[in-house]
Amino acid sequence: MKTVAIVQARMGSTRLPNKVMKEINGTPMIEVLLKRLAKSEQIDQIIVATSVDAKNDLLVRHVESLGYVCERGSENDVLERYYQAAKAHNADIVIRITGDCPLVDANLVDIAINDFKDHGVDYLSNTSPATYPDGLDIEVFTMRVLERALTETTSLFDQEHVTPYIRNSGKLRLIRLAILRICRTCDGPLMSLSILR
C-alpha cells in the first residue's frame, strides 16, 4: 500500500498573502515544512497540491527545485484538488498536511500512520477535536474514503476544507490521536487513541 502525504499550499491567502514562501531564518516556509516532513519513515511520497492560478508559479518552481512533485488543480475545490493529486500518484493512504504548518513533526506523523494501519479505521486525526497544539495538525485517511467524500458531498464548505464530510457524515470509523501524558524519561509524549465513532 502506497502512503502519500499531500501538502496543500497556495500563494493566495487573504489573511497573509504569499505566506508559504515567507522566510523563516532565510528559508521559505514551505521548504522548512517539506524538509521536516521528509524525515518520516512511513511516507512513500510527498506531493504539494496547489492551484492552477498563476500566482502559484513561484511556489511550484521552488518546490520542484527541491525535488518534490507539484500537482495543480482547482483554486476553490480543494477536495477535488486533493483527490486528483492522490489519484495521479496511486495513493492508498493519504496524509493531509496544510502548508501553514511548517513545524510538522515527522515522528508524530509516523505514529499517526502506524496507528491508522493498526486500527483499520477510515480516518485518524489529532484535529477533531484538537488534541495537539495548533501547527502539528495531521489527518490520515484512505483513498477510498477521499473518493467517497468527493462523490457524496455537495457542500461548498466540504469542498473547500477537504475532510469535514469524512468527519461529520456519521458513516465512517474515526479515531483520534491524543496525548495520554508526557514521558519525562523518554524522547517524547506517550500516545493514546480514543474511538470517536
Image: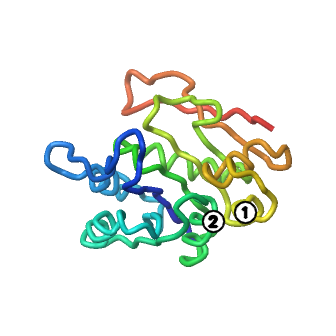
Horizontal side of 144 relative to 44 (left or right) equals: right
Q: Position of residue 74 (x, y in %)?
A: 55, 66
Q: Looking at the rendering, in which quadrant would you find the C terminus?
A: top right
The alpha-carbon separation of the residues under discs 1 and 2 comes to 7 Å
Q: Find out whether the residues at labels 1 and 2 contact each other: C-beta distance under 8 Å.
A: yes
Q: Kindly tell me whether residue 106 is visible in this rendering.
A: no
Is residue 110 or residue 173 the one in the foreground?
173
- Judge whether 150 appears above or below 105 on screen: below
Q: Look at label 1 and name its amino acid.
A: Leu
Q: Is residue 105 rendered to the left or right of residue 32?
A: right
Q: Secondary structure at mark 1?
A: helix
Looking at the image, the residue that sits furthest to the right is 171
| Three-letter residue code for mark 2 | Glu
Determine the residue positioned at 35% across, 70% down: 68
**Residue visible at 47% across and 62% down?**
43
So how many labels did they put on this image?
A: 2
Q: Looking at the rendered structure, which numbered label has been put on residue 150? A: 1
Residue name at image x 58 percent, y 63 percent: 82
What x and y, as percent, mark residue 151? 78, 65
Q: Which residue is mark 2?
A: 80
Classify residue 15 by image quadrant. Answer: top left
Q: Residues within 10 Å of mark 2 (few under 14, many from 20)?
A: many
Residue positioned 34% across, 47% down in the render: 17
Q: Quadrant of the N terminus?
A: bottom right
- Residue 23 coordinates in the image, percent (x, y): 20, 47
